[in-house]
Image (cartoon, rainbow, N blue to C red):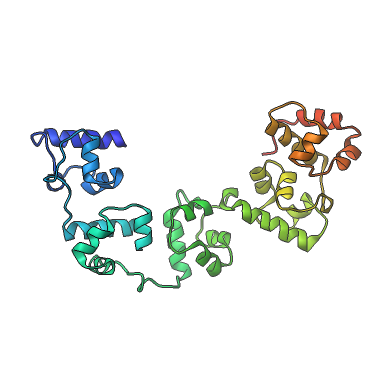
Amino acid sequence: MREKYISVLRKAAEENEGEISYKKYEVQGYSPSAMTISTYFGSWTKALQAAGLKTNEKFAKSYSKEEIINALQHYANENNGFLTLTLYKNKKYKPSESTIRKKFGSWNQALQEAGILTNREVRKWYTEKEVIRILQNVSENDKAITVEEYKKQRIQPHYDTIVSLFGSWNEAIKKAGLKENSMVYTNEEMIKALQEYSQKKGNFTSIDYEKAEVKPGYLAIQKRFGSWANAVRNAGIEPGYVRYTDREILYEIKRCLDEKETDYITVEDYKRLSNHPCYGTIYKRFNTWDNAVELARKCEGNSK
């Protein structure tokens, strides 16, 4: 993308006697827009510098009110119609806040003239319909955006608002008609699900968990943490509260082997890396530690 923008700038300059100002670039209708290029490089001057073109005070960008309004409206559209000063600064949009204040007198005045809701006007409560529209807009191919990505993009409404409105993130995803997948859940949500089920059930097996149809599901959790046993260990559940199948035990040993990138680990290594299930359980199931390790090595790939 950088090389493409530089190429366009050089071509525009070549067609204008070696110099190209922001205004001239816009007037002559080059694409992508001057705003897009300025945003990518940080400023129009920096874009010219990157392209090795002349830049001086004469050609330094001076924004008109109309240009600022167009920019604000563009950024608001990128953020589902909302634009706070904090978001503007965090995303390092241009022009600067000080430039906007000089032109309009205040940030809110600029938003008002651009037809964008100010912080005071932004609704504190969203309807389910509005949130569903937002989730659909930010998701691709009907596949739900992950919680991590939603938070990273600083999309409004806040994640907590969605949870309070729908009861859970995944309930919102379902009502939006989007496809669920294991990546919709954060590690913390998976751990919380295990902890809550353990508190409710007491001693349990993976089969118990799967039959209960708890979300996120057994396979999703196993895939995320590398093994069922590792997920249970990360949830802080005592080994004695979970009854593992032979396969689950072997895959936990296999996970430890993969982590150490070796074909063999000692009992001491295992205790440091996991001990979930404990060595005593493994000994009872497989008679010897070496036998358990040998069988674990034969597990294809890993439990993912």
Q: Residue at the spot x=86%, y=32% of the render?
A: 289
In the image, farthest residue toward the top: 263
Answer yes or no: is residue 80 visible.
no
Answer yes or no: is residue 203 visible.
yes
Instruction: Name the quadrant of the N terminus.
Output: top left
Q: Position of residue 123 (x, y in %)?
A: 40, 72
| Residue 125, quarter of the rendered image | bottom left
Q: Position of residue 302 (x, y in %)?
A: 69, 35
Instruction: Please name whichever residue, 196 or 143, is drawn nearer the observer in this view of the structure.
Output: 196
Instruction: Please name whichever residue, 205 or 109, is drawn nearer the observer in this view of the structure.
Output: 109
Left or right for 127, reference 22 = right
Q: Position of residue 80 (x, y in %)?
A: 37, 60
Left or right for 190, reference 81 = right
Q: Position of residue 128 (x, y in %)?
A: 48, 68
Instruction: Please name whichever residue, 169 or 5, is drawn nearer the observer in this view of the structure.
Output: 5
Q: Residue at the spot x=19%, y=56% of the render?
A: 67
In the image, farthest residue toward the left: 17
Q: Residue at the spot x=48%, y=55% of the render?
A: 151
Q: Residue at the spot x=53%, y=58% of the render?
A: 173
- Marks counted in the figure total 0
| Residue 13, quarter of the rendered image | top left
Instruction: Name the quadrant of the C terminus.
Output: top right
Left or right for 247, reference 177 = right
